[in-house]
Amino acid sequence: MLCVDDDEIVLRSLSHLLKSHQLNVLTCCCPVAALELVKQHQFEVIICDMRMPKINGAQFFQQARELAPDSQRILLTGFTDIDTTLTAINDGQIHGYIQKPWQNDLLLSCIVDSMEKYQLKKQNQALQQQINAQNIALKELNNSLEQRVEKRTKQIKQVLKQLEIANASEKHEHRSTVELLYNFINANPYLDGIKAENIANTCTQIAKQLQLPEKNIEMAAMAGYLAQIGLLAMDPQLYEHPLHELTEQQRKRYYTHPSTAQLMLMPATHLHDVSDAIYHQYEHYSGNGLPKGLKGNDIPLSAMILALARDYWDAYEQCQQTDAKKHQHALETVTRFSGTYYHPKLVHALTECRIKCIKQQSKIGSMQIITARQLTVNMVLGHALHSHNGIMLLPKGHLFSAKSIEKLQQLEAKKPSPFRIMIKSS
């Protein structure tokens, strides 16, 4: 392992903690010198602070990724900054994010998981090489040696099965990227994580009703979760109020958030289809939408699914009646624009689905979102908790005690709306 931080005290603390758990660790207080170490050694895990002289953590990881693409990268920071964190996610493609002051158990758990992923990736590469070697050998077999052919074929099938298991683990890593970005949306006080989940679930239902391949169904859901990601890089005044309350100039700026999202997601090549869906989510079936004015089947299918699901839940929220009547109103609203805003086949698929509203945030990846009243002792905070004016109340990794729960419940009682607390699932 390699630990990089310009604070010698932090490095000594990390070194003592890791060596006490029989981990082999090198430390470096200069990021430039650390890059030389990356050239000389093969590190399974690299931990780096965000704020450092000369180059910051995001820039360091961008260069380290080019030198050692297989090393697992964990960002360590003592402040919350969405821009620099997103830069680290996109350019440095970090695998973990730990906030100072860290909790030893959580940090060690993150490191152990990262080491396992590194070893799994190496096993994956070795298996791939083994397959290539066996394929070459198989081609050289004489057709008359049927028994040898059968034996080699069986070996290859076994290796392919092992490779499939390894690839499934890397697929989980891609989902973790979506989870991390979604958690930023859900932590924003002006963006609705529950609505995002409703949209994602409806995208999934429509895609399944259309009998799309599993990959397309998963991409549709991811687009639903991240449809609002571009707003994080924009002025909160554009989304802290309903769209109809904005000026014409503000609305024009608001509708550029899909373009911003596309730029944010561009380095994540495995999310290209998700990025496309978000970018084209305001296109209309008739051809008079944004940003390109695409028409009919020229619009990506995932974008048309996202638009229909998003507008369904917009209409649902605007109706001030019973839940059943809200769903009826939402369905009638989108049906009215079938053939103009939406593909008729998608609207028909939506009418065949049993759409349900999520009243309470459910488990998202490795996080669960609850209120202060639902807290219990020994729960672990999965994301730093801030007040409405941006003051950090509790850091990521906080282990809830009876006292901290009581104080948080007292604060929540004074708020017009409850806290949305991200708890790390056990």
Image (cartoon, rainbow, N blue to C red):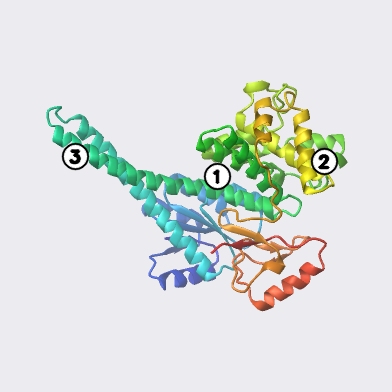
Please, what secondary structure does the residue beneath circle 3 have? Answer: helix
Image location of residue 186, percent across then percent down: 68, 53
Between label 2 and label 1, give the one nearer the viewer.
2
- Picture quadrant of residue 330: top right
Please, what secondary structure does the residue beneath circle 2 have? Answer: helix
**Which quadrant of the figure contains the N terminus?**
bottom left
**Extreme left residue here?**
144
Image location of residue 221, percent across then percent down: 60, 42
Please, what secondary structure does the residue beneath circle 1 have? Answer: loop
Residue 69: tell me if it is visible. no
Look at 62% across and 59% down and name the residue there: 368
Residue 243's disc is 2
Rendered position, 223 above or below 7:
above
Rendered position, 95 above or below 387:
above
Q: Amino acid at mark 1?
A: Asp
Q: Quick one: label 2 or label 1, which is nearer the N terminus?
A: 1
Q: Quick one: label 3 or label 2, which is nearer the N terminus?
A: 3
Residue 151's disc is 3
Between label 3 and label 1, give the one nearer the viewer.
3
Please tell me which residue lies in front, 94 or 332.
332
Circle 3 packing at 10 Å, graded few (<14), some (14-19), many (20+), is: few
Q: Quick one: label 3 or label 1, which is nearer the N terminus?
A: 1
Separation of residues labelled 2 and 1 (CA atoms): 32 Å
Look at 66% across and 21% down and name the residue there: 296
Q: Amino acid at mark 2?
A: Leu
Q: Amino acid at mark 3?
A: Lys
Q: Which residue is mark 1?
A: 91
**Extreme bottom residue here?**
403
Please tell me which residue lies in front, 36 or 390.
390
